[in-house]
Amino acid sequence: MKYRYLGHTGLEVSVLGLGTNAFGKRADQDTSIRIIHHALDRGVNFIDTANIYAGTESERIIGLALEGRRQEAVLATKAGLVMGQGPNGRGSSRYHLMQELENSLRRLRTDYVDLYQIHTFDPHTPLEETLRTLDDMVRSGKVRYIGASNYAAWELMKAIGISEAKGLNRFVSTQVSYSLADRTPERDLVPMCLDQGVGIIPYFPLAGGILTGKYSLENRAPEQSRADTDPNFSRFVIDRNIQLGQEVGRLAAGLELAPSSLSLAWLMGRPAVSTVIVGATRTSQLEDNLRSVDMTLSAETIQELDRISEPFRNGEPFATYRLS
């Protein structure tokens, strides 16, 4: 396994991280635990979850899997998206975040998380309130580092500016949809992160499986694909995304590589990227993704991937999650 520093911190994370959105939903408890143990055995130390994944089941399962192995993991979770029906069941207020951190710690069976992330920008809570709450969490020892997710570049820069001015712990990372099918972060977010030393953690690095080559214009929901098991995903299975997946597949076939490995290796080579989180619903899928770690792409291959994905620098992001 290869490791990189998370932004400008001294924390080293595996270049391939494990995303756990499917745990407790598309992967049952026993399968999920096997995947986590296999990841740790192969040197993957970054495990990313959130309080809302599979209705809290993801965190609970991870807590079980890490019993006796907690020190092997850099454990990241999130809060801020809708968690309850009440007036304080969402957002990044002090009230909500303090409550959700305690709930996450209980489910994860740990007394600290390595990276606590705000799942999305909250336009209704002053940033200073959020940042002071996160600073208190770090000072308490319950959180090691703090990160953002789904923040626009200006929102992240404003938060960093407040932290610097007030002497508060600052965001060290940001999660964003980033892949060959979504290069929109390169317009503003990537330059900002390079300037400020913030590590980028791409999610949807394979565009939900579209970049694996399994989708076609004729078959938009292959058996056991995400579009097959999660009907909500069908909104991403549009012509331009499928056509890009097919182009990546043809290039990969010519190089005798898997399209997923090629796509991940390209993303790992992008500026400011610290770790790429990829989900898995079986250990063999994780093993396939691990091949990207030791892959070295030629300048010609990178140039061709850049060319075919250039149109995806513009327009709307592949995915983003915001509070209404």
Image (cartoon, rainbow, N blue to C red):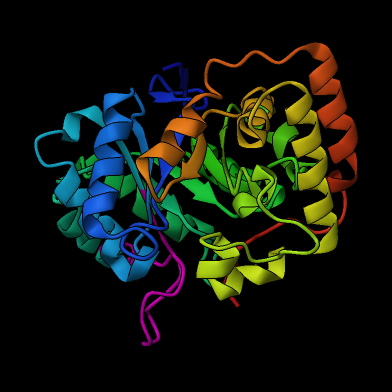
Query: Residue 86 or 104: which is nearer the viewer?
Result: 104
Which secondary structure type mostly characterizes the magenta part of the structure?
loop
Say how many tags the image has: 0
Q: Quick check: can you spot residue 214? A: yes
Q: Quadrant of residue 85?
A: bottom left
x and y percent of residue 275 in the render? 51, 31
Taking the magenta stretch, the answer to whether it contains residue 193 is: no
The magenta segment: 77-98
Taking the image as shown, residue 194 lies to the left or right of residue 113, namely: right
Q: Residue at the location (64% across, 60% down)?
A: 320
> In the rendered structure, does residue 83 fall within the stretch colored magenta?
yes
Residue furthest to the left:
68
Image side of residue 268 versus residue 39, left or right: right
Q: Quadrant of residue 157?
A: top right
Residue at 40% x, 86% y is: 87
Depth order, front residue of 203/124: 203
The quadrant in which the C terminus is found is bottom right
Relative to 132, does residue 34 appear above or below in the rendering? above
User: Residue, x 53% and y 36% (percent of image)?
Assistant: 164
On screen, residue 108 above or below 10: below
